[in-house]
Image (cartoon, helix red, strand yellow):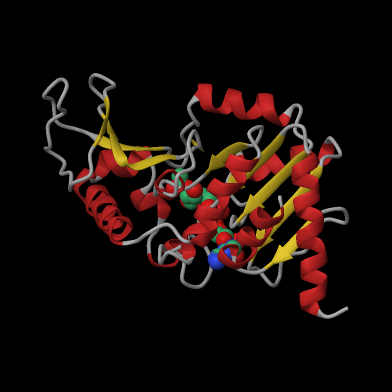
Amino acid sequence: MSDEAHLEHYIERAAKILRAARAPLFLSGAGISAESGIPTFRGTEGLWKNYRPEDLATPAAFQRDPALVWDWYNWRKRLVAEKQPNPAHHAAARLAATLPNLMTVTQNVDGFHALAGLAGILEMHGNIYRTRCPSCGDIAENRGDIFADTPCAACGKPGLRPDIVWFGEAIPAAVLQRIYERLNVCDAILVVGTSGSVYPAAGFAVEVRRREGHVIEINVDENHRPYANDIYLRGAAGAILPRIADLV
Ligand code: OAD
């Protein structure tokens, strides 16, 4: 079988599994936005090659130097604002429209899934366009640049932080509870563009596999060694996900 025939065969199988699944789950990571021009975190071009997470994405880093942290997030906000969702995001929205029982979860903070028309996606790591006020707890949409002294629109105090889950912080309990309720019954998970290095998201496929559900993964990683029963679709999300959405 040629590589293309092999891929087509597994794309068809993946579509069939998702169509038949009672409680499917979709999980995306930074790789799904790579074709939009948003850098991923790991890998040769990844953000964590040039920046250290402990300087920028921890509560201690923000306490130490909020101006530096906001510089970085303002830069990333501008980067996202210049880019658009790609065919993979549009395909994910089509998939969700075709499969009303699909729960959709992303680790990405760029908001591209919603922009592509996917309603109700759980953004488990937050959203880059939202701020949270440590004084009054207000969460607000804030698309422009934020500075260490920008006052909270609700209480007027400075100290706004990005509404993003940093290293060492917990995912909001209500979000995590919904995901685990689904994982308890999940019979098929589709994992797109994540290195599987950050928990708890990295454990979702493990949990589905443990319950003998199907694991379908799309990733460009050539070194990835899939588990025996997994369907591993090697390639760009923007090329593969639309083909699955066409068949479901
Ligand atoms: P990573 O940067 O760790 O992984 C991106 C994955 O996408 C890698 O496995 C790549 O091989 C794959 N990839 C790259 N381009 C792709 C493409 N066009 N199509 C398909 N796959 C592609 O990103 P995440 O796994 O999302 O946390 O990282 C998890 C978390 O770590 C992020 O949410 C972030 C980070 O620190 C926070 O910011 C809280």
Q: Is residue 226 visible?
A: no
Classify residue 65 as left or right of residue 18.
Answer: left
Q: Is residue 86 above or below residue 165?
A: below
Q: Tell me residue 172's x, y (percent).
A: 48, 27
Q: Quadrant of residue 76?
A: bottom left
Query: Residue at (75%, 45%) from the top-left corner?
Result: 18
| Ligand 1 image position (quadrant) | bottom right
Classify residue 19 as left or right of residue 168.
Answer: right
Q: Quadrant of the N terminus?
A: bottom right
Query: Residue at (25%, 57%) from the top-left corner?
Result: 78
Query: Residue at (28%, 51%) from the top-left corner?
Result: 73
Q: Is residue 109 visible?
A: yes
Q: Residue furthest bottom?
A: 2
Q: Is residue 198 above or below residue 218?
A: above
Between residue 34 and residue 204, name the one nearer to us: 34
Between residue 155 and residue 12, name the one nearer to us: 12
Q: Quadrant of residue 133?
A: top left
Q: Tell me residue 200's x, y (percent).
A: 61, 38
Between residue 237 and residue 118, name the one nearer to us: 118
Classify residue 121 as left or right of residue 137.
Answer: right
Number of marks: 0
